Amino acid sequence: MKLRGSNHSPRGTGVDCAALTCMVQLAQIIVGAGLGALVNLAGSVVVVVLSASTMSLFGCIFIALFIRYVE
């Protein structure tokens, strides 16, 4: 299977899965570093629960204000 007007074959599922896996791994590293810095700054692991709750609240507010459902 080739793209029209091109000699290159289209991107496969394996490349998509690899890119998605790399993005997830990078996100885990960034979140871990950020939460580690917050725990060191606060001196307690309670900040993990508080920050997760805060981000969930922001997500709910964002969805309530900006997502429009089409009927």
Image (cartoon, rainbow, N blue to C red):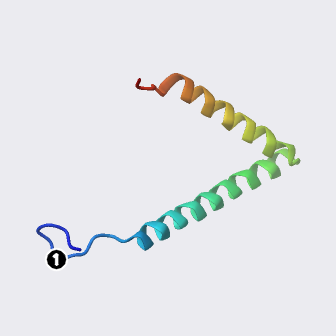
* 48 up-or-down from 1: above or below: above
Q: Quadrant of the N terminus?
A: bottom left
The residue that mark 1 highlights is: 7
Q: Considering depth in this image, is 48 or 38 the residue closer to the camera? A: 48
* Left or right, 59 with reference to 10: right
Q: How many marks?
A: 1
Left or right: 17, with 41 as reference point: left
- Residue drawn at 59 percent across, 57 percent down: 27
**Residue under the point 41% across and 69% down:** 13
Q: Mark 1 Cα within 10 Å, few/some/many (few <14, many 20+)?
A: few
Toward the viewer: 14 or 1? 1
Quarter of the image for residue 49 reads top right
Q: Amino acid at mark 1?
A: Asn
Q: Specify the farthest residue to the right.
A: 44
In the picture, the quarter occupied by the C terminus is: top left
**Label 1 SS:** loop
Q: Residue at coordinates 45% horizontally, 25% vertically from top-left? A: 68
Relative placement, left or right, of 30 versus 53 is left
Residue 43, x across and y down, in percent? 88, 48
Residue 14, x across and y down, in percent: 44, 73
Q: Is residue 51 above or below residue 60?
A: below
Quadrant hosting residue 2: bottom left
Q: Position of residue 52 (x, y in %)?
A: 73, 41
Query: Which one is nearer the viewer's eye here, 19 or 47?
Result: 19
* Relative vertical location of residue 10 with respect to residue 57 in this rendering, above or below: below
The residue at the far front in this view is 71
